Amino acid sequence: MAASVPDTVGRPKALDLTRAELPFVRERSPLHGLQSWIARHAAGGLLPLRGLWPPMAVIPEAREGRLRIELVSHCWNYSHLLECQLGSLLAHPPREVDLTMTVYFSREDERTARLLDLAGAREVPGVTWSWRALPKELLFRRSIGRNHAALTTSADWIWFTDCDVLFGAGCLDGLGRALQGCAEPLVFPSVERLTNLLEDEDLQGASEPELRLSGKDLEFVEVPVTKAKGPLQITHGDVARGMGYCRDMAAYQRPEPSFAKCREDTAFRWLLGTQGTPVQFDGVSRLRHLSKGRYSGPASSSAVRRAVRKLQERLRHPG
């Protein structure tokens, strides 16, 4: 179902980011694999290397009143999910917070580019669109875009999310109320609503992008959240500007030949020294999908990945 919104009076222009505007991006290195292994196991607690990265020295300032919140998504071959996310904002715009919706994308992903043009042609009170184009090799390491967003945000809070997350009626206003006077570095919703593991045909949109809510009617189950996992990392703006997103971990600031697994999310929480603090607000939903469109590779690799995800689903939800 398409969201009904007023026509626009202007169209935002996507910002094409270059290496010069990304000073923390590192060149590829022969030691990249080793550094990635070290970073992964240090953040996982298997290597006692915390002293290599300074602890968080930022003291966040509590803020009250009408808050500024920035949402940050990445999209590569996920435009059918992003159109649902943007559609949820069009259908349920916030009234009590000022929202910026930032999307990092590559112009080589033509359907996503057309979708952002379509969304940018809609004006939503309280919402500012912000489109940022990256060369795909930089988009493929998600922490590069997240680091850029963290260091440049002017928001009171920045929510690092994914384009399969939907924001229901009152969700962002509820978040704004929950964050009044909060000085925690990292928070997350105490509950989220999840679909079953869905096939492509359950989510696929039309050949041309459209702004919609979720396509078919889907059932959601409310599930408690135990930590600020990858798409639910709501970070205090002072912390984001002071720390970036894995800014000083070279392994997570290098281009990749294909979309890399987002292991930097664990490292981000490790660098902050917290798994986050739960806050209570409603309306966060997530479309769980079997196909990982952002990953490329041989068909056999994709088939194995799908089989593993199906097995994980059976183990987690038997019957």
Image (cartoon, rainbow, N blue to C red):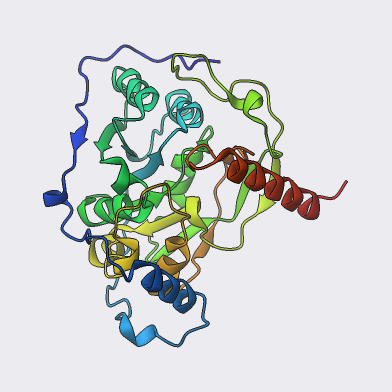
147 to 38, vertically: above or below: above
Q: Tell whether 212 sits left or right of 302.
A: left
Residue 199 % position (x, y):
67, 31
Horizontal side, residue 18 vs residue 87: left or right: left
Looking at the image, is 63 positioned above or below residue 121?
below
Where, by quadrant of the figure, is residue 73 drawn? top left
**What is the x, y in percent for residue 249?**
31, 69
Q: Is residue 77 above or below residue 8?
A: below
Image quadrant occupied by the N terminus:
top right
Foreground pick, 95 / 136: 136
Where residue 110 appears, as percent x and y from the top left, is 35, 24
Residue 271 found in image quarter:
bottom left
Q: Is residue 68 visible?
A: no
Residue 187 spot, x, y in % from top left = 46, 60
Q: Nearer the viewer, residue 61 or 3?
A: 3
> Looking at the image, how many numbered discs can be counted on the residues?
0
Residue at 45% across / 78% down in the picture? 42
| Residue 114 visible in the displayed image | yes
Tell which of 37 and 131 is nearer to you.
37
Q: Residue lying farthest right?
A: 319
Q: Quadrant of residue 198?
A: top right
Which residue is found at the position 34% from the left and 67% from the top?
A: 32
